[in-house]
Image (tube, grey):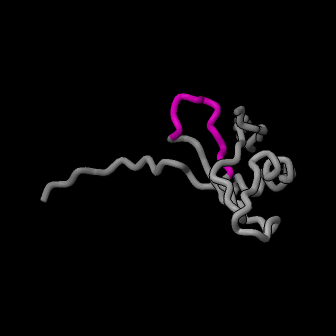
């Protein structure tokens, strides 16, 4: 099965690949894949809440979620997104 994707161009000129993961009955995770493609540590994610289903056994379809998002909504979610990896450099200190 091929994953449905869209593209988003961020204000700094990077073109991110956008896809939907972990759809449930009321939410899904929107993943912005960094264009370098070498590692997921630069990827970003945001959660989407939806009131489209009323049956908790029913699942949202990734394609439907992605198709329902406008370009403005994808941009807004990108601004609110978080890094997948908190690449922190810890400073060693002597005790």
Name the quadrant of the N terminus: top right
Asked if residue 89 lies left or right of residue 53, the reply is left
- Percent of width and height locating residue 33: 63, 39
Q: From where the camera sits, is residue 57 visible? A: yes
Q: From where the camera sits, is residue 80 visible? A: no
Count how many numbered circles sit on residues in the image: 0
Looking at the image, which is closer to me, 76 or 22? 22
- Vertical order, 15 against 51 (above or below): above
Say which residue appears at 81% left-offset and 56% top-offset: 73
Q: Is residue 3 magenta?
A: no
Say which residue appears at 64% left-offset and 32% top-offset: 35
Looking at the image, which is closer to me, 69 or 63? 63
Looking at the image, which is closer to me, 43 or 57? 57
Name the quadrant of the C terminus: bottom left
Q: Is residue 38 magenta?
A: yes
- Vertical order, 21 against 14 (above or below): below
- Percent of width and height locating residue 60: 75, 56
Say which residue appears at 78% left-offset and 39% top-offset: 6
- Percent of width and height locating residue 72: 85, 53
Looking at the image, which is closer to me, 59 or 62? 59
Check the image and name the residue furthest to the left: 95
Q: Which residues are magenta?
A: 30-40
Say which residue appears at 70% left-offset and 43% top-offset: 19
């Amino acid at each position: 099965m091929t994953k449905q994707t869209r593209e988003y161009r961020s204000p700094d000129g990077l073109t991110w690949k956008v896809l939907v993961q972990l759809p449930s009955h009321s939410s899904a995770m929107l993943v912005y894949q960094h264009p370098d493609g070498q590692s997921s540590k630069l990827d970003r994610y945001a959660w989407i809440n939806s009131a489209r289903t009323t049956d908790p056994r029913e699942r949202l379809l990734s394609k439907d979620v992605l198709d329902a998002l406008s370009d403005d909504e994808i941009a807004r979610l990108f601004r609110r997104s978080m890094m997948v990896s908190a690449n922190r450099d810890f400073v060693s200190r002597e005790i």
